[in-house]
Image (cartoon, grey):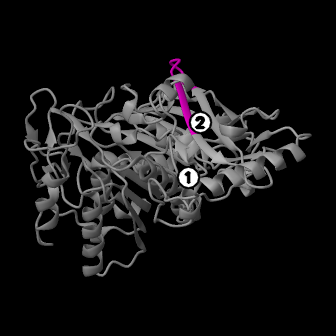
Amino acid sequence: MRKRMLSERRSCISNVTVPPASPTLDRQTMKLGKTTRDAALAFALLLSSASAHADMALHVTPKSRLFTDPAYVTVSAAPPGAEITIEATLTDRGGQAWTSRGVFYADLSGEVDLSRDASVFGTYKGIDGEAIFWSMQPATSAQLSAAGNTMDNIDSPRRYPDFDAFNASYDLRKAPVEVTLNAQVTGILADSDKQAATARQVVVLVDEAVQRVVVSEGDMRGVIYEAPGMGPHPLAVVVTGSTGGINELKAMSLANEGITTFALAHFNYPGRPTSLMSISLEYFQNALAWFAGRYDQTRVALLGDSRGGEGVLLIASSFPDQVSALIPGVPSNMVYAGVDISTMEHGPAWSLNGEPLPYFDWKFTDLTPSHLWPGSGEARHIYLETMLTPGLDDPRWIQVENIKSPILLISGDADAVWPSDIASERVVARLQAKGFEYPVKHLEYRGAGHLVIMPALVKSRGEFAEVVVPGVPGLTIGGAPARNAHAQTDAFRKTVDFIKHHESAED
């Protein structure tokens, strides 16, 4: 399946500032008067008649791609000026249909280019070459039409296709997904003899050459995804957040990119504690050493998101010589309590040298209603005081100045779980105050929420995702769909580049 060449890839996004959720269409186009509009349509009919010998075609390139790679969708030989409706559909492993739609106007050459032309109606609006894929909704074409194309009117508990979920198993992702795209002449020129065109694209979720290795060594648990081809490859370890388990999705996504990655379990996984309570940081020290030694290296990149972002900052601060690059996603700058899911009692989440680390407690007793669904709420404000006010000498601060590697912090300023953007800035400020000598970069995405760190194919309903925290129902993640989607794409690409730039194989 690995038919693509790396040289064919092109970056979809060139900077951190992402486009608005609903880009404003050209005012001249949107405010055409009736006379001008009628004249334009008459001219389009004339041009359509003159070019009736050609058949409309829909082009999707490449024919096969990794789900994290860009795709390019164009239409040719359409009636000039015609309204063109493009739909994309897929069916997930459980049989759920997912559909997106955009409505465009062909130019005078009869062409539509989704990376250039604005959708004026559908599951997204504006210019967005990626959106025909990320904006899919859990609905058939008919259901989408009945819902008025908006996710607000689609009554479905589905947040993602099953293969895109955070905890998606290897079995759900090992086979590619086929996306079918259809272009249809609609509107006043719908009687044209060039009515429709179809194209298909195969989307690879995990490269068939990637090897999956289950790890059970002493008390260490997890899964390694080995990058294809001859090594040495960069190495990375992924630490999970408040849900525990293992993050196979990110591990296999990085392996697709040539980075051998260890999805490490530290709780809520067979053979590991059930809760994030008194987890020994030495457990990670041993895991990093074992993983690096397995591939004859000494240092590895370290990634973690949310409570995992807090965790990797602690790990790299405690064992700095084992880390080649550090990527804390939506992290905290402070140490917070863990919770025993059997008793719901709070206590230390982490320990070092047999002693619990000092921590701030947290209580979700006053969530801000989010109105996404009954009982849902945001917790961002709950952490503001404890993230902002403590001085640098507070023992609950993570001692990030001890780190000896480049750092890439990732956050969204609409994070509804906790203010990871503010926490990241506090980390940067502390490093500057302490004279930190390594490169530090903070990717802060405007309008994006807590899931900026999660690669996915379909991203339309991310804001409806629920963060699982013991005893806290309905904790929402924040952000707007387009902002989340573009942040996820950009953050993943920059993460890959960062790891490779500081790869352990060069040590």
Left or right for 360, reference 468: left
Whole-percent x and y of residue 421? Answer: 29, 62
Tell me the residue at 58%/58% (across/down). 32
Q: Which mark is residue 296?
A: 1
Judge the density around disc 1: few (<14), some (14-19), many (≥20) Cα neighbours within 10 Å: few
Depth check: 368 or 253 in front? Answer: 368
Res. 221 in view? no
Front position in the image: 278 or 455: 455
Above-or-below relation of 98 to 83: above
User: Do tag 1 and tag 2 residues touch (Cβ < 8 Å)?
Assistant: no
Instruction: Place residue 314 in its image quadrant.
Output: bottom left
Tell me: 439 left or right of 15.
left
Q: What residue type is labelled 2?
A: Leu
Q: Is mark 2 on a helix, strand or loop?
A: loop
> At x 7% / y 41%, what residue is drawn?
365
Residue 332 in percent (x, y) is at: 25, 57
Q: Residue at x 45, y 58 (%)?
A: 20
Q: In the picture, which quadrant includes the N terminus?
A: top right
Can you say whether 229 is above or below 374 in the image? Answer: below
User: Which mark is first along the chain, 2 or 1?
Assistant: 2
Write down the region rendered in magenta: 91-101
In magenta stretch: residue 92: yes
- Is residue 60 visible from the viewing direction of this image? yes
Q: How far apart are marks 1 and 2 (CA)?
A: 28 Å
> Would you name the residue on which mark 2 appears?
205
* Residue farthest along the front direction in this orientation: 35
Amino acid type shown at disc 1:
Asp
